Image (tube, coloured by chain):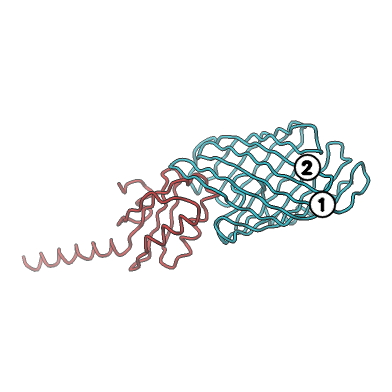
Chain colours: A cyan, B red
């Protein structure tokens, strides 16, 4: 069985609204960013602490499974996030991010338990954003002995209107995502994104009819 | 007549002093496009003991810092906070108006 106990996730979720590799993956210096990404086959929660304006350290717990539910993985990693480069212009900002993760993977293959292994999860993200449009591409490796669950994600969208700093801004975001050795499908997820200062919420339904929720909160 | 002139000039002096005793800094910032990402600017500015209030305007690319009565704030500090938050300061103007006045768009 996929060891997902919904109650165990909901309680921390209330306190630790979240998000992972989308928008800025870390907050301002001294801030704690909590994140979560939930759908039927992929559940991820984590947090990071920005030790400088460009560096953050954090922990992530991830569970994912194949479409038929026979292959399952649980991944716990210690993560380092680095803002490699940022370009600011009058109406836009773009960023290049580096992710480094190291931890443990457990799980099962064809319902047979697989031994615990060391996993490395380096990755990159490039994003470009104005007050009206958003684009991000993320490639993250999940590599362990005989395991390769690299993920690639592309996100693009637009805001319905320009909102000021203290107002909620709604966005339409379309994401495509592929996870190696877990699914033959490319997941396509149209989502509604709402941002209000330190609260970030996204929700949608993917091309398999499964709902998805992304949350993020910075404090 | 001399007394009247004295009273008027004293009045003007006090008005002028009180205006400049509480300056606001209007900072034009490049790259500030998202409230989720710009919140660090507001938090760090508000944490300064000299700060009375802060306004962040995404549409007009402005950060306005209003300083408490009788205090001043170094422009270098403002620049450093905005740079450390990941943005670029384009210009800083000192305004004699409070934030509410500047938000209303009448501070031209």
Q: Label 2's element?
A: loop
- The dot on residue A149 is 2
Residue B105: % across, % down: 35, 46
Q: Residue at x 51, y 51 (%)?
A: B38
Which residue is drawn at the image coordinates 78% and 42% (left, top)? A149
User: Along the line of sight, which residue is nearer the eye, B97 or A41?
Assistant: A41
The correct choice, above or below, for A169 with respect to B10 in the image is above
> Which chain is indicated by disc 2?
A
- Give the SS element for disc 1: strand
Q: Residues within 10 Å of mark 2 (few under 14, many from 20)?
A: some
- Residue situated in front as seen by the camera: B66 or A142: A142
Q: Nearer the viewer, residue A130 or A82?
A: A82
Above or below, B87 against B59 in this view is below
Residue A181 falls in which quadrant of the image? top right
On screen, residue A47 versus residue B3, left or right, reads right
Q: Mark 1 points at which residue?
A: A105
Q: Is residue A34 left or right of residue A43?
A: left
């Amino acid at each position: 069985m996929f060891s997902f106990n919904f109650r165990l996730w909901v309680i921390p979720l209330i306190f630790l609204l979240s998000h992972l590799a989308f928008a800025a993956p870390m907050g301002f210096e001294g801030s704690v960013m909590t994140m979560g990404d939930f759908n039927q086959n992929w559940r991820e929660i984590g947090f990071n602490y920005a030790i400088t304006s460009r560096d953050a350290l954090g922990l992530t717990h991830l569970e994912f499974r194949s479409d038929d539910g026979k292959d399952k993985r649980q991944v716990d990693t210690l993560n380092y996030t680095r803002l490699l480069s940022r370009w600011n212009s009058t109406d836009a900002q773009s960023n290049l991010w580096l992710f480094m993760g190291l931890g443990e993977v457990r799980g099962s293959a064809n319902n047979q338990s697989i031994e615990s292994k060391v996993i490395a999860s380096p990755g990159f993200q490039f994003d470009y954003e104005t007050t009206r449009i958003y684009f991000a591409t993320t490639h993250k490796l999940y590599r362990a002995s005989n395991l390769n669950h690299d993920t690639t994600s592309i996100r693009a969208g637009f805001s319905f209107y320009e909102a000021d700093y203290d107002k909620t801004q709604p966005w339409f975001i379309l994401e495509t995502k592929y996870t190696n050795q877990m699914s033959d499908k490319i997941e396509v997820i149209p989502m509604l994104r709402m941002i209000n200062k330190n609260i970030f919420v996204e929700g949608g339904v993917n091309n398999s009819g499964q709902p998805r929720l992304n949350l993020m909160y910075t404090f | 007549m001399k007394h009247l002139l004295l009273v008027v000039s004293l009045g003007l002096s006090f008005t002028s002093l009180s205006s400049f005793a509480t300056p606001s800094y209007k900072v034009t910032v490049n790259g500030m496009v998202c409230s989720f990402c710009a919140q660090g600017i507001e938090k760090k500015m508000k944490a300064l003991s000299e700060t009375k209030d802060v306004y962040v305007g995404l549409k007009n690319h402005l950060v306005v810092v209003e300083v408490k009565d009788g205090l001043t704030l170094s422009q270098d500090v403002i620049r450093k906070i905005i740079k450390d938050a990941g943005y670029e300061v384009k210009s800083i103007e000192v305004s004699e108006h409070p934030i509410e006045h500047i938000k209303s768009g009448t501070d031209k």
